[in-house]
Amino acid sequence: MTDNTVAGHEEQPGRALAGLLRNWWESSARDGREKPTQQSLAKRLGIDQTTLSRYLNPAHASNAPGRIVEQLHTALRAPADDLDRALALARAAAAGKRPAAAAPGPAAAPAGPSADRDAAARRRGRSPVAYPALAVASLLLLVLGGFVWWLVPTTTGQSDAKGTAGVSDRPSEGADWPLARKGNVLWKARTVQLLLRANGFDVKVDADYGPATAQAVKKFQAAHGLTPDGKVGKDTWPLLVITVDSRTTEPDAITAVQYLLHHAGVPTDSTGTYTPSTMRSLKEFQESRNLPVTGVGDEATWRALLNAQGPDQHK
């Protein structure tokens, strides 16, 4: 019987994932290190202990998302070859989820205009007898609204501008750039490394913001007239990011966008190529963040993607 079968049937991806994660945890006590407690591990991941216990329990239906899988892989120093398999299981488990069955509706009412009106009222949570009262109230509100409009002069210019700003305010565009620095692991380190490679710096993409990455950042900053402090913040990010669209030829920049999209909750394949699927994912993310829906990974979209990631992680 193979690792992926149970009682002659293919094991569910969620169970296989939980078994693999638990094996990482159980096997983490090596090279003189003690196995971390679930409490300390949960704190490091930014989740509660009960949730972590479910992720490590093959008998539980709760499946760890890709972000948690990556964090566990790094925190527990699991075998490098296990990560791709674990992420594939996480995607398969997420794809296999089904919405809960809808509760049975009320018994069918007799046909006819009156029954149709009553059924519509029930769908809106109203009693059929409330219709006359609602009609009178609506008429009074209409008359009162017209009277107020007649009394208060209509304003244009500044008032309209303020009203429009209130509706189209885009918090994602105004969010600050996050600070990436030496000691970061996972998404901050991986994104900086991919963008450094896209800008011509030969750095290893290992999701560990170590001395080599910091030194490459310093060289990039010096080349662009910035203070070479090795930290990627509000002045360095705008120069480091690369616009990603159908004309982009830097696979590392495209991979970085695809990686950030996937971990922002928009499932995206990491291909290093700007595909129609990548465009759709970008548009979906932009729409969810009140950004212009262009399918182009511009500066505002990069900033929103970075601010949509998980908690900051350090060694």
Image (cartoon, rainbow, N blue to C red):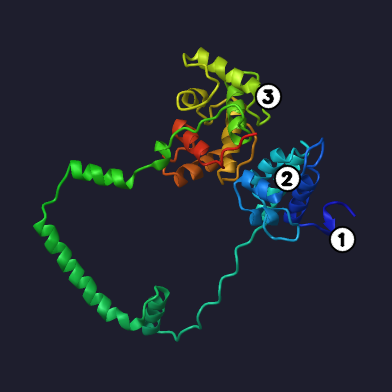
Q: Is residue 228 above or below residue 5?
A: above
The circle drawn on residue 204 is 3
Residue receiving disc 1 = 8
Q: Is residue 90 left or right of residue 243?
A: right
Secondary structure beneath dot 3 equals loop
Q: Quadrant of the C terminus?
A: top right
The residue lying at 54 percent from left, 42 percent from top is 281
Front position among marks 1 and 2: 2
The residue lying at 10 percent from left, 58 percent from top is 150
Q: Which one is earlier in the sequence, the residue at label 2 or at label 3?
A: 2
The circle drawn on residue 80 is none
Q: Amino acid at mark 2?
A: Pro
- The image position of residue 163, as x and y in percent, is 25, 47
Q: Compute the Cα span from label 2 to label 3.
A: 28 Å
Residue 126 occupies quadrant:
bottom left
- The image position of residue 84, as x and y in percent, is 73, 40
Pick whichever, 55 or 100, lies toward us.
55
Q: Which one is earlier in the sequence, the residue at label 1 or at label 2?
A: 1
Q: Residue furthest bottom?
A: 110
Q: Amino acid at mark 3?
A: Lys
Secondary structure beneath dot 1 equals loop
Q: Are marks 2 and 3 in contact (CB under 8 Å)?
A: no
- The image position of residue 135, as x and y in percent, is 25, 76
Secondary structure beneath dot 2 equals loop
Q: Amino acid at mark 1?
A: Gly
Q: Compute the Cα span from label 1 to label 2.
A: 34 Å
Q: Residue furthest right?
A: 1
Q: Quadrant of the N terminus?
A: bottom right
Pick whichever, 125 or 177, lies toward us.
177
Residue 8 occupies quadrant:
bottom right
- The image position of residue 164, as x and y in percent, is 28, 45
Residue receiving disc 2 = 36
